[in-house]
Amino acid sequence: MTTDTKAPTQAPDAFTAGKRKADDAAFMLTRVLAEMDIRVGDPDAWPRLTGRASLSGEPYVHLGTVPLSTARKLIDALLRAESTRRSSRDGGGH
C-alpha cells in the first residue's frame, strides 16, 4: 500500500520509464525504416514518429500519418519477411 505522499512521485516515475521505453522503440523503428530507405522526418516518406507514454506509464509509439506509397513499401517488406519465415520453418523440418 502506498501512502498519499508517495503516490504523486510514483506517477511521474512510471511516466518517465514508459516514455523511455517508447523512445527506445521509436528509435529502433527509425533505424529499421532507415535500412529500408524510408526516412523518418521526410514528409514524403514518414513525416513523424514519436515515443509517448500515458500518465500511468504505458509506453506506445505514435506513427503519425504515413503516405500510402510508404505504407505499401512497408507492407511488401513485411509480407516478404513472413513468407521467408514460413518457408524456412516449413522447409527446415523436412
Image: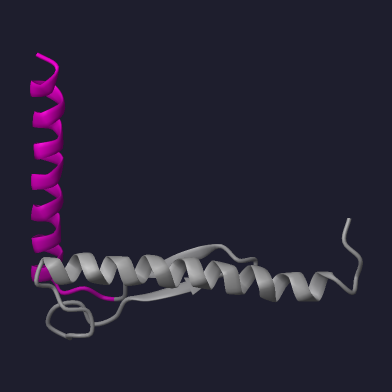
Residue at left offset 77%, top offset 75%: 9
The answer to which image quadrant residue 62 occupies is bottom left
Q: Is residue 61 left or right of residue 56?
A: left
Q: Position of residue 4 (x, y in %)?
A: 90, 70
Residue at left offset 8%, top offset 30%: 87
Q: Nearer the viewer, residue 55 or 3?
A: 3
Tell me where the magenta segment starts and ends, as one range.
65-94
Q: Position of residue 7 (x, y in %)?
A: 82, 70
- Which of the image's four quarters has the N terminus? bottom right
- Which of the image's four quarters has the C terminus? top left
User: In the figure, 58 relative to 66: above or below?
Assistant: above
Q: Is residue 72 left or right of residue 24?
A: left
Q: Nearer the viewer, residue 41 or 20?
A: 20
The reply to whether residue 47 is in sight is yes
The answer to which image quadrant residue 28 occupies is bottom left
Q: Main secondary structure of the magenta part?
A: helix
Residue at left offset 89%, top offset 74%: 5
User: In the figure, 73 relative to 30: above or below?
Assistant: above
The answer to which image quadrant residue 72 occupies is bottom left
Counting labels gives 0
The reply to whether residue 55 is in sight is no
Is 90 included in the stretch rendered in magenta? yes
